[in-house]
Each structure stands twice: as structure tokens, then as C-alpha cells.
Image (tube, rainbow, N blue to C red):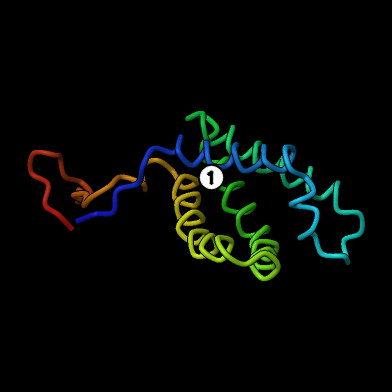
């Protein structure tokens, strides 16, 4: 049975909500910015903007592929900060870490051309044959 993905609008909502949280509670995120990066607030706001932008791009079919690629990239880029948050705060933050892999996979799936995202098996048409006499390759 092929894996079914929910609507990309769900992932868009996750990204917009997560990015918005950077502006609603910046001090929470400022604590996990590595000291080597200097003042944390610009990094918090930049990552929030990146997450919201990725979500908005995912929401529209015409920009979904770039939104998926941006979402995957943002999720990978912020993973070390999420690990730091889990070490620092513990609890529920540890449960968040294993969820990132399927989110990256889902985002990357949305970045692929629509023709390669068809769910289930597809019959391949042999070259130089019509649909009526096509054999599978």
C-alpha cells in the first residue's frame, strides 16, 4: 500500500505557525542560538521569516516546489538548534526531534515535480507504442 501524504496545506500551516512563534516568543528561541553567531535576535527573526516564507510558498500550487525545497532546507538548518533546545529544556522537546525527519521528507516530496509525486504504481508506456497497445516496461 503506497504511503499517503496529507495536503501540503497542513505542512504550510505548520511552517507558518512555527515561524510566527519566533515573533510571539523570541526569548524562547534566542536561548538556543549558538553564542558563536553573536546577538541572537536577528537569527531568531531571520529563521522565523524563513519558516513563514516557506509555509506561504508551500500554500500556493504555483510556488509549492520552491516552498518545499525551502521548507526542507529550513528544517535541516534549524535541527541543531532543536537538539540544543531538547538538551536545555528536556521533556516534550525530545519528542519533537524524531518528527523532523518525516517533515523533511514531506517537504522534499513537495519540492519534486508533480509528475513524480503520483501516489501508487504507474504504468510505464513503452516508447513508440500507443496507450491502446502499451505494455508495461
Where does the image place residue 44, in percent across and percent down from the top left? Answer: 78, 48
Q: Position of residue 125 (x, y in %)?
A: 20, 48
For the residue labelled by badge 1, is the local secondary structure a helix, a strand or a loop?
helix
On screen, residue 100 versus residue 2, left or right, reads: right
Q: Camera-side residue: 87 or 101?
A: 87
Q: Nearer the viewer, residue 41 or 129?
A: 41
In percent of width and height, residue 120 lies at 23, 50
Quick one: quadrant of the C terminus?
bottom left
Q: Left or right: where does residue 129 sit relative to residue 65?
A: left
- Residue at far left of view: 133
| Residue 7, picture quadrant | top left
Residue drawn at point x = 61 percent, y = 40 percent: 54
Q: Which residue is mark 1?
A: 68
Which residue: 48% across, 59% down? 99
How packed is label 1: few (under 14 Cα within 10 Å), some, or many (20 or more)? many
Query: Residue farthest to the bottom?
Result: 87
Q: Is residue 133 left or right of residue 71?
A: left
- Residue 29 drawn above or below residue 34: above
Total numbered badges shown on the rendered structure: 1
Nearer to me, 106 or 17: 17
Q: Give the answer, above or below, for where 121 lies relative to 59.
A: below
Quadrant placement of the N terminus? bottom left
What residue is rendered at 49% in x and 53% in y? 103
- Of 82 and 56, nearer the camera is 82
* Residue at screen point 49% across, 52% down: 108
Amino acid at each position: 500500500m503506497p504511503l499517503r501524504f496529507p495536503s501540503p496545506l497542513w505542512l504550510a500551516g505548520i511552517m507558518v505557525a512555527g515561524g510566527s512563534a519566533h515573533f510571539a516568543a523570541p526569548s524562547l528561541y534566542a536561548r538556543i542560538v549558538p553564542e558563536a553567531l553573536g546577538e541572537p535576535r536577528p537569527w531568531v527573526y531571520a529563521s522565523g521569516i524563513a519558516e513563514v516564507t516557506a509555509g506561504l510558498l508551500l500554500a500556493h500550487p504555483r510556488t509549492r516546489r520552491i516552498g518545499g525545497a525551502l521548507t526542507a532546507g529550513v528544517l535541516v538548518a534549524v535541527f541543531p538548534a532543536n537538539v540544543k533546545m531538547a538538551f536545555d529544556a528536556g521533556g516534550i522537546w525530545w519528542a519533537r526531534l524524531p518528527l523532523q525527519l518525516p517533515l523533511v521528507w514531506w517537504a522534499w516530496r513537495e519540492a519534486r515535480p508533480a509528475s513524480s509525486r503520483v501516489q501508487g504504481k504507474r504504468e510505464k508506456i513503452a516508447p513508440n507504442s500507443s496507450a491502446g497497445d502499451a505494455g508495461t516496461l
